[in-house]
Image (cartoon, helix red, strand yellow):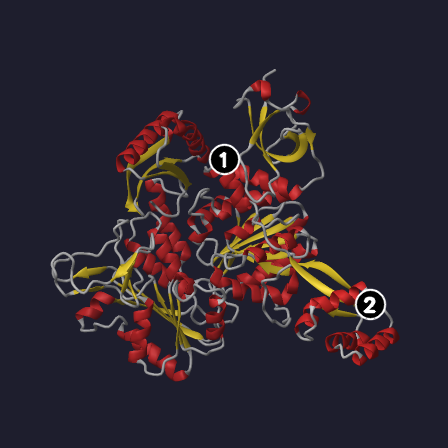
């Protein structure tokens, strides 16, 4: 019988995840072990039994067999949560490619040492009469601080320690002396930090429409019958998807289980949390990157101990260590932020389905503009599709105008705003209504170039142009390099060097110039860097303290402002120029979501799309809010070209400090990928070639793509390449895998 070996991580709660250690699998456990299981193993010189988790099984011995230790046995009933997390990490490592340590660090909650929050209370140990007697004595001795404390203790059995040392001004030494005398006792208890700081009154439960009620009823009925699955909720903007999520979560919580609600942007946290808090109070919490290390740790501990039922956050919230998840909701499931851009490059939608499988949970995906992947699977019957086609306010979708900027220029309008938008905005300001102005870019200006010779200011470390920001500085958005804007062109010496393409700051200035007295708010990467800035901007606009909200993509995703009756989209077709097979899909989604922000209250809404490509199908279908029409046209292109979701694609990305070695490694791996395929007709290899941005921060980038209809075929090629990569003797090179990439390198 062949020997079996297990790779085991010892004590995963340790601050630093060490390498796995290999152990022999005894015959008594052969066939009984699985990845993720908890086992007892002898560890260290004294062979003390330690708890460990299996992260891999195989028949290859990596060390001296004579010195190999055996697994002592399995540990049952211990840490089911961690077993599931280890199993999930192994699944991610297999399906997306990375080291096991990278996968574990992705899945496991914050492990850094965090100071626990301690609450201290002073408890009276004597009766009121005895305390009053001591009070009289302290007054005679003129012990003022002790007297203040005894006076409070005469009326209260317990007092917060911080209040005594702070408000009363009593020193710790005085408190300790009274404790030694048996007058009081200082009691300590650990407390969890709670990042939820909202004040919301419980609101009256809303009546669901027939379509909403059907979704809730059928999903919960399936759950009760043990038929958990994946559901796609395709609802137009304003159709009440969030209310459906809330009712489904209520149903799952009433059944004694927990729910995870994923949102694509931190900017959406405040509004989403407010609506859930009205239903679940302190039993709901958040997890996102704005939290301190202590707050993150405490939310994980609260979840583990069953002190919360619902967690809200971006894709990382999927790894909250709940003991018994019953439902995972992914709102705005089409968003690219659900795909990790660092290794392992997992997609939250697929990982959510694996988490649901491990827990026996349901998954609900929701969007007004579903990803082609989700809609494709729904059409094939893999997901169950529900459609919400009416706005709950009783209103209709906004009237949309497509303005051709080429025609505007020909007719003498050199403004960044079309004449129609200028007129509609003036009407809104006069009537006291609100507007949203969306710009599909970030920064004060785009590239900076010389009008005399055409020289473009570029980053010395990356193959990208520098962007001009306020204060006259040029900034690289990839590596952070910055320099002052030169007064003259460094190539020809001409003074005619300036930035092009408007940014949010420039638009804000132009608005104030054209409409004196207009109250504006700006929401972009520059104004939302500090903690709480999202909430502050959204709350200010929601309270009608501003007339126009100007911003980049984060302002068009899921926000609900009843006072907004006009949306303007500037540079609508900018995203069509990106050399990416998803460009049309992204543009359609962006425009549909943007115009959907208008008319969500009782007043009718209008939207203006300004574009240089008014005839493009992504623009025309978005203006008509026609998702099926767009899907029908786009899927034909994907099927013809073999792009996801009609086929699968794996990007093999090579990063190198030396350009020649990087190109050589990319070519070598591309040849190996062809050799690895059992059926060469089942795959197609594109490249290798330099990345669209060939160098970032002095690191050269190369990529090739492997296409196949079968995902498992790509996994097999990835496994083969991972085995062969060490033979290259890497020196400053690294390789990453990206399955069904959201962005081309």
| Label 2 element class | loop
Marks counted in the figure total 2
Please give the label number shown on residue 183. Answer: 2
Q: CA distance from mark 2 to mark 1?
A: 63 Å
- Whichever of labels 2 and 1 marks the residue nearer the N terminus, that label is 1
Q: Is residue 451 above or below residue 412?
A: above
Task: State the residue in front, 663 or 168.
Answer: 168
Residue 648 visible to an observer of this rendering:
no
Residue 272 visible to an observer of this rendering:
yes
Q: Quadrant of the C terminus?
A: top left
Q: Mark 1, residues whose alpha carbon is within 10 Å: few (<14), some, or many (≥20)? A: some
Left or right position of 673 against 77: left
Q: Mark 2, residues whose alpha carbon is within 10 Å: few (<14), some, or many (≥20)? A: many
Residue at the spot of label 1 = 94
Residue extending furthest toward the front = 141
Task: State the residue in front, 12 or 282.
Answer: 12
Residue extending furthest toward the top = 1
Front: mark 2 or 1: 2
Residue drawn at x 66%, y 34% is: 50
Q: Are marks 2 and 1 in contact (CB under 8 Å)?
A: no
| Percent of width and height locating residue 267 | 47, 63
| Percent of width and height locating residue 173 | 71, 66
Task: State the residue in front, 378 or 654.
Answer: 654
| Label 1 element class | helix
Task: State the residue in front, 462 or 370.
Answer: 462
Left or right position of 220 against 694: right
Dividing the picture into quadrants, the one containing residue 140 is bottom right
| Percent of width and height locating residue 134 | 84, 75
């Amino acid at each position: 019988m062949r020997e079996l070996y297990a790779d085991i991580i010892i004590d995963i709660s340790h601050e630093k995840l060490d390498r796995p250690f290999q152990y022999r699998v005894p015959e008594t456990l052969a066939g009984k072990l699985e990845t993720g299981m908890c086992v007892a193993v002898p560890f260290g010189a004294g062979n003390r039994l330690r708890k460990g988790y299996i992260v891999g099984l195989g028949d290859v011995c990596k060390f001296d067999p004579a010195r190999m230790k055996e697994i002592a046995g399995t540990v049952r009933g211990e840490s089911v949560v961690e077993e599931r997390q280890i199993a999930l990490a192994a699944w991610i490592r297999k399906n997306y490619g990375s080291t096991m340590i990278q996968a574990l660090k992705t899945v496991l909650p914050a492990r850094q040492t965090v100071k626990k929050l301690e609450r201290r209370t002073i408890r009276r140990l004597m009766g009121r009469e005895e305390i009053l007697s001591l009070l009289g004595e302290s007054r005679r001795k003129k012990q003022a601080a002790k007297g203040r404390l005894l006076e409070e203790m005469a009326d209260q059995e317990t007092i917060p320690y911080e209040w005594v040392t702070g408000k009363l001004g009593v020193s710790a030494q005085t408190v300790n002396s009274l404790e030694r005398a048996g007058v009081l006792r200082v009691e300590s208890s650990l407390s969890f930090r709670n990042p939820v700081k909202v004040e919301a009154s419980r609101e009256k439960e809303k009546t669901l429409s027939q379509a909403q009620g059907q979704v809730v009823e059928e999903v919960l009925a399936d759950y009760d019958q043990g038929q958990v699955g994946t559901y796609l909720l395709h609802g137009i903007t304003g159709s009440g998807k969030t209310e459906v999520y809330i009712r489904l979560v209520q149903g799952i919580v009433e059944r004694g289980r927990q729910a995870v609600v994923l949102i694509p942007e931190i900017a959406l946290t405040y509004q989403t949390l407010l609506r859930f808090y009205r239903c679940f109070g302190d039993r709901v919490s958040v997890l996102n990157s704005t939290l301190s290390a202590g707050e993150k740790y405490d939310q994980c501990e609260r979840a583990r101990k069953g002190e919360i039922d619902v967690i809200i956050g971006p894709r990382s919230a999927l790894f909250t260590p709940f003991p018994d998840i019953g439902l995972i909701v992914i709102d705005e499931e089409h968003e690219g932020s659900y795909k990790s851009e660092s290794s392992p490059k997992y997609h939250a939608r697929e990982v959510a389905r694996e988490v649901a499988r491990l827990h026996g949970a349901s998954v609900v995906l929701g969007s007004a503009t579903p990803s082609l992947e989700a809609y494709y699977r729904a059409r094939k019957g893999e997901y169950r599709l529900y459609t919400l086609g009416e706005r709950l306010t009783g209103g209709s979708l906004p009237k949309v105008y497509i303005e051709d900027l080429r025609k505007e220029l020909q007719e003498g309008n050199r403004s960044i705003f079309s004449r129609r938008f200028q007129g509609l905005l003036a009407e809104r300001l006069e009537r006291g209504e609100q507007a949203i102005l969306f710009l599909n870019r970030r920064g004060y200006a785009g590239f900076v170039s010389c009008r005399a010779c055409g020289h473009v200011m570029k980053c010395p470390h990356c193959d990208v142009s520098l962007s001009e920001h306020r204060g006259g500085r040029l900034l690289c958005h990839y590596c952070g390099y910055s320099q002052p804007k030169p007064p003259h062109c460094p190539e020809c010496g001409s003074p005619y060097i300036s930035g092009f393409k408007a940014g949010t700051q420039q638009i804000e200035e132009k608005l104030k110039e054209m409409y004196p007295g207009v109250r504006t708010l700006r929401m972009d990467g520059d104004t939302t860097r500090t903690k709480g800035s999202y909430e502050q901007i959204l709350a200010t606009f929601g309270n009608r303290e501003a007339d126009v909200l100007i911003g980049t993509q984060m302002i068009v995703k899921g926000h609900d402002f009843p006072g907004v009756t006009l949306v303007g989209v500037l540079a609508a077709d900018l995203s069509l120029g990106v050399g990416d097979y998803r460009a049309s899909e992204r543009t359609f989604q962006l425009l549909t979501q943007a115009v959907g922000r208008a008319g969500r209250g009782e007043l009718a809404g209008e939207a203006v799309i300004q574009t240089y490509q008014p005839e493009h199908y992504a623009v025309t279908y978005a203006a008509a809010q026609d998702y099926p029409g767009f899907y029908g046209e786009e899927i034909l292109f994907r099927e013809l070209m073999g792009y996801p979701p009609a086929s699968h694609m794996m990007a093999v990305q090579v990063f190198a400090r030396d350009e020649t070695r990087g190109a050589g490694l990319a070519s070598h791996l591309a040849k190996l990928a062809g050799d690895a395929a059992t059926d060469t007709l089942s795959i197609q290899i594109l490249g290798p070639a330099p990345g669209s941005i060939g160098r970032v921060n002095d690191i050269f980038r190369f990529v090739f793509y492997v296409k196949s209809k079968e995902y498992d075929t790509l996994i097999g090629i990835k496994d083969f390449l991972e085995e062969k990569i060490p033979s290259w003797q890497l020196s400053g090179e690294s390789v990453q895998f990206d399955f069904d990439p959201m962005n081309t390198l």
